[in-house]
Every structure is written in structure tokens, then in C-alpha cells.
Amino acid sequence: MVYELEAYNTDCRYSQDVRYREYTSSKKKAEKFNKIPKIQCTDSGHGIVFNSREHNGKRKPIVKTLDSYVREHLSH
């Protein structure tokens, strides 16, 4: 089983705004990724959310913009 870990902007105007994406076969890592707190960007309620899901098919490019933030939260 392969999991896609993705952090993206919740503002629908920027639906393709992915700040982090990687793939893992670790279920434990995928579960921890889902627990990373949302990054609140504005008072509007939009922000960056973290989501993992089972992945099938062609992989999208890896994105590591929030790499240090993700590593910090996964190390706990």
C-alpha cells in the first residue's frame, strides 16, 4: 500500500496550491501526517491542511516547501 501525503491551501481560489507532497508505504507515518495541525493563514479561516490517503496510479511531483514544518511534527 502506498500513501500520498499532501498539504494544500483550503482557499478554493488556490485549489492547486500544494505546499507539500510525498509518498510513503508507512501507515504509521500517514496517520501521523493527518494529525499535523492546520497552518492558519488569515482571519478568513483559510489555511494549509495536511491529508494522507491511499494512492493508486501515476504519482504527481514531490513538493517540499513545508519540509521542515512536516519533519518537526512527524518527529514527535
Image: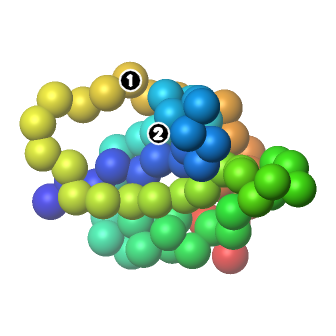
Of 12 and 2, which appears nearest the observer?
12
Name of the residue lying farthest toward the top: 61
Q: Amino acid at mark 2?
A: Arg
Q: Residues within 10 Å of mark 1 (few under 14, many from 20)?
A: few
Residue at (63, 42) in percent of width and height: 11
In the image, residue 37 sits, relative to residue 40, either above or below, namely below
Name of the residue lying farthest toward the right: 43
| Mark number displayed over residue 61 | 1
Q: Quadrant of residue 30?
A: bottom left
Residue 57 left/right relative to 24: left
Q: Quadrant of residue 31?
A: bottom left
Q: Residues within 10 Å of mark 2 (few under 14, many from 20)?
A: many
Separation (CA) of disc 2 from disc 1: 7 Å
Q: Amino acid at mark 1?
A: Pro
Residue at (63, 67) in percent of width and height: 36
Image location (x, y in percent) of residue 20: 55, 39
